[in-house]
Image (spheres, helix red, strand yellow):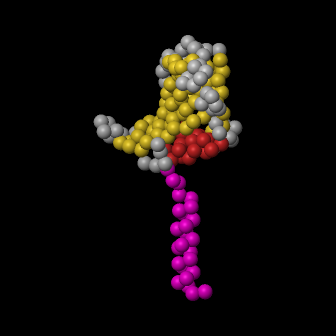
Amino acid sequence: MNPLIKLLSCIILLVCTHAAHAQYCDFDDDSVDIYTRKHIRSSEFIIGTYPLHWSLKMEQNGDKYYIYYHILAFGKVDDLLPAGTKILVMLANDTIITLNADEDVVPSYSIAQDKTRTMLSIWDVRASVTPDVMKLFSASPSEMARITIGSKEMNAVIKRRQGLKMMATAACMIDVD
């Protein structure tokens, strides 16, 4: 075989291999705050099962990381979620990540807009996380989240596809500058 063809083949193989392993980062929001000039990246995920889907949002704001939970429960639940409340996240590699609510959260209420007119209680929780915690999220897909509000333990199953997206988003946040 011609040495030039061998060289070109090796270069093409090297470029294709690198492109195949390159990470594609797609955020729901990838912007710069006009006041602080901090780079903000975030992606939102739907977790849990119908009818009580939770949402989880991963955010990088400058050099800080946050995870937001939008948690739903049937009925009027007046339980305050105090600062420091633990949110447990189980990963596929059996790692359990403990997040802590940053501040007290008072529930808000909504009436479902369907024929049942069911009342929902809603908590919007923010947890600050470290880069090391984001590395844990990037190492394995998330499978389940758990929080205890009042005396009620609430679980949200995370579908495989959402868990993989969360893993990729965490990897992008800690790798991309």
Pick out the residue farthest to the left. Answer: 35
Return the x and y of residue 121 as percentages of the image width and height.
56, 19
Query: Looking at the image, is 87 positioned above or below residue 43?
Result: above
Which one is in front, 121 or 44? 121
Q: Is residue 119 visible?
A: yes
Q: Residue at x 49, y 27 (%)?
A: 126
Query: Looking at the image, is 128 positioned above or below residue 18?
Result: above
Which one is in front, 67 or 174? 67
Q: Dominant secondary structure of the magenta stretch? A: helix
Query: Looking at the image, is 86 positioned above or below residue 142?
Result: above
Return the x and y of residue 21 as percentages of the image width and height.
56, 59
Which one is in front, 94 or 113? 113
Return the x and y of residue 165 as percentages of the image width and height.
57, 44
Magenta highlight on residue 165: no
The stretch of residues the image draws in magenta is 1-25
Pick out the residue farthest to the right. Answer: 94
Pick out the residue farthest to the front. Answer: 115
Return the x and y of residue 85 as percentages of the image width and height.
57, 21
Q: Is residue 100 visible?
A: no
Q: Residue at x 53, y 78 (%)?
A: 8
Pick out the residue farthest to the top. Answer: 78
Q: How many marks?
A: 0
Quadrant showing the N terminus: bottom right
Q: Residue at x 61, y 41 (%)?
A: 163
Q: Residue at x 53, y 84 (%)?
A: 4
Magenta highlight on residue 18: yes
Query: Looking at the image, is 106 positioned above or below residue 157?
Result: above
Instruction: Name which quarter of the figure residue 73 lies in.
Output: top right
